[in-house]
Image (cartoon, coloured by chain):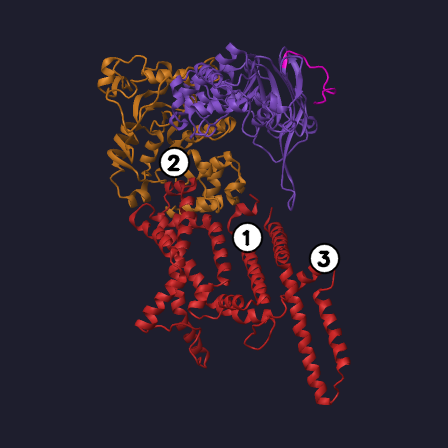
Chain colours: A orange, B red, C purple
Amino acid sequence: MPILTIKNLSIHFYTPKGVRKAVDRVDLELNKGEVVGIAGESGSGKSTLALGIMRLINYPGKIVSGEIYFNEENILKMSEDDFNKKIRWKKIAMIFQGSMNGFTPVFKIGDQIREVMEIHGYNGDYDKRIKELLNMVELDESVANKYPHELSGGMRQRAFIAMALALNPEILICDEPTTALDVITQAKILNLLKKLKKELNLSIIFITHDLALLSEISDKLYIMYAGAIMERGDSLQIYKNPKHPYTQLLMEAIADINKDYIKGIPGFMPDLANLPNGCRFSNRCPFAMDICKKKEPELKRLDGDRYVSCWLY
Amino acid sequence: MGYKTYLIKEIIIYVTVLIAAMSLLYILTYPVIQEVLKATVQTEAEGFKQAILKHASGHGNLNLTSINILVNKYKASLMAAYGLNQPLYLKYFIQMKNLLIFNFGNAYFLTAPNGSHKVYAIIAAYLPYTIILFTTGTIIVILVGTLLGLLSARYAGTVWDKLVPTIAVVHSSLPTWWLGFLLIAALAYAIKIFPPGGITSIPPPKSPLMYSINMLYHMALPLIAFFIVNVGGFAYVVRSLVISTTKEDFVMTAKARGLSDSRILYRHILRTASPSISTQVALAIAGSFAGGLTTEIVFNWHGVGWLTYEAILLNDLPVILGINFVLTVILLLALFINEMIKGYLDPRIKAGE
Amino acid sequence: MIDMSHVGYIDPNYIFYIKDLKVYFTKGGFLSKPHTTKAIDGVNLKIRRKEVLALVGESGSGKTTLGRTLIGLQKPTSGQVIYNRDGNNPIVIDPKVKQIKKIRRELQMIYQDPYSSIDPYMKVYDAIAQPLKYAGVKSKEEINKKIEQSLKMVGLPFDLIQNYVFQLSGGQRQRLSIARALSLDPKFLVADEPVTMLDASLKGEIVELLSKINKETGITILFITHELPIAKIIANRIAVMYKGKIVESGNAKTVLTDPLHPYTKALLEAYPKIDPTLKDTYKTINVKEEGKVISNGCPFYDRCPFATQKCFEQNPELKEISADHEVACWLY
């Protein structure tokens, strides 16, 4: 039984220019101890999806439909109070791209971690737990007594991960956690996440635009484009044999240290408030057929756990 | 950098600013100051002469020439003391020294209630009343304004939030004196709840308790006028500061980790925005010492503002200059204390960012 | 005239000669201890005519400062930047000298952020026409011709000139930036992280475009980036910077297939590769955490796993190890 199941989730933003369908009928499953990678460029909706799971969507955005089941309970139906007490940070935690600036600048690191534990009624020795957490993320215990600005970006990111793990969550959502860091720190943070996955049996949703980075950690892969899932399946299989034209083009576009060339994808992503009839990738797709412009393809199962949303199949 | 180093650095900066401000004031008012000093010397000499004459006539010793010599000697010593016949740089130092000990000379026309002609005594007599009214009013405005600003920022975008910007714009456009007249007409004449002006009734009550109550009773209308005009602006500034802080990354993560909205607002956001708010508080309090010239006139409240008005009408330069200097010092002092407070509140400032 | 007598022999194959360049920024000094940032700390570099040289480093390595100093936007604290425009006319680049104005046109730059490097409220026409006017091109026909040529070169339709810049997308703006630079017929182009802020699907186009421009017009390009994989695609030669010094340089393929410096090795190991088989393994990154020790020698001392006392005391100079492959490290 998957630990997290998202069914038909739609998140829309009501702007003066129209209704932007940032997330459009998305399904997703996360199994225990697994890493699900969500790949997409800016505007694909991947970050909005993450915020939706944490129920942090603010005006003018709104979750318009869908269900999110955590261990068989629909967390979208819970009251805000319930969700905040039982799920948010306690069962599902999140680290952001701006997590390095995620600490309040005027309080010490240790005090902020302690605050999180106090709010959620953690049972146990606070100081001991803080030491334990810092060790887990390979930081020195003295970090607890420091202010955020006294640490480097990489150290702040680790400290934030420590705070995210304070209540022993089952799911960790990582939204571009390493994009603002230098590549060596990025590699070290990735090592850390792999270690945590193994030692704590953590289930991770890893969101990034860097397909190469994703390949190094994901078990399953979801490719998002303009708010919808284009392809999903086993990570190894998709990298070996991408089916959806967008996935194929994206693989060509990603620069990897072993490659000699990259190709761009001509054209533009459609306006999320004005999605075309038919497939949303049709205007850029080299294999576009007539039907692609008229009717939107469904996410169809190909074999095993591979699903593709494309009329070629 | 350490808090101590920060303090020392700030002290040096502010003392430098104070000296620079005083020097600038001195340069700009140099010819006037010379006049003032000459006049002071003249009146002092006159007073001295009168004293001698009185003493001499009482002893029958009226030798005018020797009296005049004495007076002139006295005059010369005064001129030396004020540096009137010294080269420019010495004059400057003497004047700076005098300013630092609040020696502004004598007023031309005004006198303090206790009879003294000394400018500092005059100012000292009226300043407390300004403080009692305006500083109290400012503190109320700060407390209420901060609360309103916080609430407004919390509900930003909703109907409730429209209140603060509206009040800020509409109310602060109202001239205090006009509002004052309105309040007096309505609440002191039409419905006689409050007195129309003055600091206390005439004659003031004897016991300290009754005196205080009586003063409070007289303070009511000017306070109301002051509050109405100023609370909106302060609330608006607080609201803006809080909203801009809310946009920062750490607020989103605070929400993500389960902290309640009020906790985030009153602990995390407020504390982070407090150095900026503190600066506004410092400026407001410093400004309150200047009083409201028109407010004090309308309500016949004899404080520094009213004094400034009287001095301008009478062209009493020494008093005007003296008030000017006192207010500059108060402003710099307030800003300096603010720097100390900011350094304490925000650890980043201590580290020198 | 600039006194070139002390400069010595300049090989005409090189368009830029950078000798012992240092750029230090000093802050404070009035009431607090002055704080000096050594953005460039002793760089010797030769840039070949018509090549694409990639300058690779993390933020803080000094690469942007180097780019700016080369085209005369930043005054060197010491050392020299010598621009050898056509082989026998070397000029020292110094923003304070009057002569710099005449050659500014030949040295152009494109920037990282397409949204803030061109005034969004301008018309596209003016975005290219204005620099031309400042460069002294007076006739309207000539301006129009240059605009037409440069827009064609970057693949933007000519009728875009009536639009405002804010109507263009990020990718289009970056192309416009390149057109703006090209219209002045430069000999040297500094591209400062030109694709860093673009989406994956757009990076390829811009990189391809710059490569094409270099091949067709022979403009020398200094391609500054922190993304090694991108550098690999476009560069003939690579220079790796760390804390203001060049630690390794040479032919791009050689450096990337056979890195010598521990930092370069760590970078190549750290960069993500599309390889799902790695997902359960840990990467070995042979780099320690940044320490508090500041050495007077090698800038990489506190992070290097092979550091010795010599590394702490003496700064290694760039030494040629094999053909077109130099490294600054005491291991060699």
Q: Is residue A1 visible?
A: no
In this orientation, which residue lies closer to the viewer: A55 or B73? B73
C-beta proximity under 8 Å, tags 2 and 1: no
Are discs 2 and 1 located on one and the same chain?
Answer: no
In this orientation, which residue lies closer to the viewer: B93 or A65? B93
Give the secondary structure at mark 2.
strand
Numbered disc 2: what chain? A
Magenta residue span:
C1-14
Spatial CA distance of label 3 from label 2 is 68 Å
Label ID, residue B89: 3
Crowding around mark 3 (Cα neighbors within 10 Å: few <14, some 14 to 19, many 20+) is few
- Residue flagged by tag 2: what amino acid is it? Met
Spatial CA distance of label 3 from label 1 is 33 Å
- Residue flagged by tag 1: what amino acid is it? Glu
Rendered residue at 74%/74% (across/down): B72
Tell me: A10 left or right of B344.
left
Label ID, residue B339: 1
